Amino acid sequence: MERTLEAKVGGAVDAWIAWLPRWKPATHRVRTRLCRRCLGSPFLKAIGLDADVPHGVQHGLTTRMKALIDDVVDEYTDQNLPVLSRELKETERRKARSYRPEVGLDPEFDGLQLDPDPVPGEPFLFTLGELAEGDGPPESVRPIELSEEEKQALRTEIRLADECADHAGRLICGFLQQHRVRAREAVAEIVEPQVTALLDALSESLDVPPTRW
Ligand SMILES: [Zn+2]
């Protein structure tokens, strides 16, 4: 598993670098919520992009690493955790009937806030978040009632899945360190000129000399 994961981390970093030229500095209103995936992320620390890098650029990387962990845990769950596997499939089956705007997004958008922050006095007609919540049967409606034994097994299996995710996360952090130099170079070559250009444009618009009459 380690060798494959190492190769996958390399591939994900390649994909992230290939995507970087499509990144654009956000000139729209700054979002107020902090991103839980990127704030203090051990992945960003491991690859050396935890400071002075725009959030969109960081997010494109953390999301790709999160997807790798999910793959490892899914595979492990499928092969080793029968109760959890059955429960997840059941949940998926029920959720498949409802609208989920957060599913199937490009990695750069995955995990971000679905709707922009509301502006006081300008209510939305609807939000994607509400649409997602309003559909499908409520979470409390469970078609299968678990026995005490199954509940206990499920708790154990959830713990094992968590341990598997933790283990994969640590391995990924180790592998990411091999890509520090090229990640830094890619950011310096592709991202930093855009940030500098944006800052120059901003300071020019602030430096307009007063009109002389
Ligand atoms: Zn983020």
Image: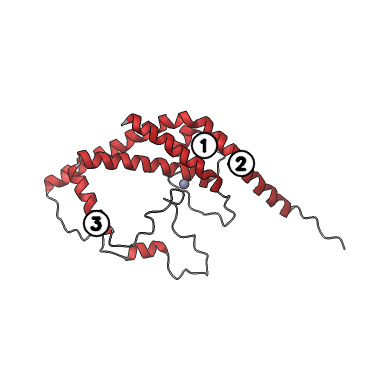
Closer-to-camera residue (191/33): 191
Q: Position of residue 92 (x, y in %)?
A: 26, 54
Residue beneath the point at 59% across and 37% down: 188
Residue beneath the point at 24% across and 37% down: 160
116 relative position to 8: left or right: right
Q: Which amino acid does label 2 sit on?
A: Glu
Q: Position of residue 139 (x, y in %)?
A: 25, 59
Disc 1 from disc 2: Cα separation: 13 Å
Q: Is residue 186 above or below residue 83?
A: above
Please indicate, yes or no, whether residue 70 appears anywhere in the rendered image: yes
Disc 1 from disc 3: Cα separation: 38 Å
* Quarter that holds the N terminus: top left
Secondary structure, mark 1, is loop
Badge 1 vs badge 3, beta-carbon distance below 8 Å: no
Q: Which of marks 2 and 3 is nearer the N terminus?
A: 3
Closer-to-camera residue (203/40): 203
Of tags 1 and 2, which is closer to the observer? 2
Q: Earlier in the sequence, mark 1 or mark 3?
A: 1
Q: How crowded is mark 1: few (under 14 residues within 10 Å), some or many (20 or more)?
A: some
Q: In this view, does 157 lie above or below 209?
A: above
User: What is the number of the mark on residue 93?
Assistant: 3
Closer-to-camera residue (75/195): 75
Asked if the beta carbon under badge 2 is closer than 8 A to the nearest atom of ligand 1, the reply is no
User: What is the number of the mark on residue 192?
Assistant: 2
Q: What residue type is labelled 3?
A: Arg
* Quarter that holds the C terminus: bottom right
Residue beneath the point at 19% across and 58% down: 142
Secondary structure, mark 2, is helix
130 relative position to 147: left or right: right
| Residue receiving disc 1 | 49
Q: Which amino acid does label 1 sit on?
A: Leu
Q: Position of residue 88 (x, y in %)?
A: 24, 50
